[in-house]
Amino acid sequence: MLGQNIGNRNAESRNGSGLKIGLALGSGAARGWAHIGVLRALEESGIEPDIICGTSIGAAVGAAYLTDQLDELQAWALKMGWLGMLGIIDLTFRRGGLVASEKAFERFHNERTDVRIEDLPLGFASVATDLSTGREIWLREGPLLPAVLASAAMPGLFPAVRHEGRWLVDGALVNPVPVSLCRALGADVVVAVNLNSELSPLGRPGNAKAEAKREPVTAGGDAGSPTFSHLTGQISTWLGRKPNRRTRFLADQLDHSRAQIPNALEVMAGSIDIMQDRITRSRLAGEPPDVLIAPRLAHIGILEFDRAAEAVEIGHAAASMLRPSIELALRRA
């Protein structure tokens, strides 16, 4: 069954060109809802990927697409809001992360996700990082949901995942936009989605020199640097009701009114942004895709999951704008 399935998936391109399109969906936490818009736009343009590889949130959205649950994922994202975010937060940190992964993914643990990667209709793989060695791990076979959870285990946010005797964490630590994995799975043309393209100082909104040099990828204005004031304010209020040292310390860390220095979540998020930007630029320089979709998402923080509608729209616009580039890449390949 396994060999037969792989043979069927690799037989021919879905686009009638004889060329296999690989879609590399990058990391970015809450910015990842833009991947939904990208997939919608490609579908509307008649561009169907033959291979999907994802890192972190990219793996989650890619898996939802391949298990025919993209509509459900989008509906859940649009309804999440701040109360939904608070509902999946584990304030004790006993499990190694701020978010309880089983709460975040429980609604997608069903018969459609309870499948093996090699039995999916298209080629799929996710990227994770071995916490002990720092090695890049490609999850190309085995149960689907654990492969997604491991790829999305962002340090400090989601707990590490035990997989085949190893503790795995977010693939964004080593390969934020998995172009190389798409190539390894046989893609002739790779379309990559980089959600963090504007996170470096020269790419941030408001930088006049950057604005003069940068060619806009998608419509829509920028709203400033990432902010977590609303989320941290809500958590601070909740924590303040718990009369013990640990929760009061956390409340102090999350309370903007007590100090002007960045709070704990902002430090974590900013550090992850810097890391992802540096690694992504390095990897894409050595392993460039044929087409790079780079939605302008710097104004959406990695924990602002309540801004799904905005992210989806930006992703859709960015992918729609680059349809001619994808068609040109298919003709040139």
Image (cartoon, helix red, strand yellow):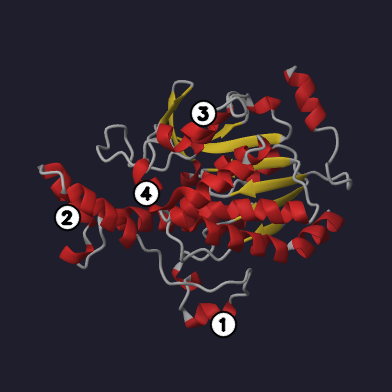
Q: Nearer the viewer, residue 271 or 25?
A: 25
Mark 3: secondary structure:
helix
* Residue under numbered circle 2: 252
Q: CA distance from mark 3 to mark 4?
A: 26 Å
Q: Earlier in the sequence, mark 2 or mark 3?
A: 3
**Where does the image place residue 327, in percent across and percent down from the top left?**
82, 59
- Residue in the picture at 51% in, 55% down: 308
- Graded by Cα atoms within 10 Å as few (under 14), some (14 to 19) or many (20 or more), the crowding at tag 2 reads some
Contact (Cβ within 8 Å) of mark 3 with mark 1: no
Residue under pointer 4? 83
Circle 2: residue type: Asp
Q: Position of residue 259 (x, y in %)?
A: 18, 65
Looking at the image, is mark 2 or mark 1 earlier in the sequence?
1
Discs 1/4, front: 4
The answer for how far apart the CA atoms under marks 1 and 4 are is 40 Å
Mark closer to the chain start, 1 or 4 = 4
Q: Disc 3 marks which amino acid?
A: Pro
Up the image or down, 29 lies above or below 281; here it is: above
Q: Which circle marks residue 146 in the picture?
A: 3
Mark 3 vs mark 1, CA separation in Å = 44 Å
Say which mark, if any, is on residue 212.
1
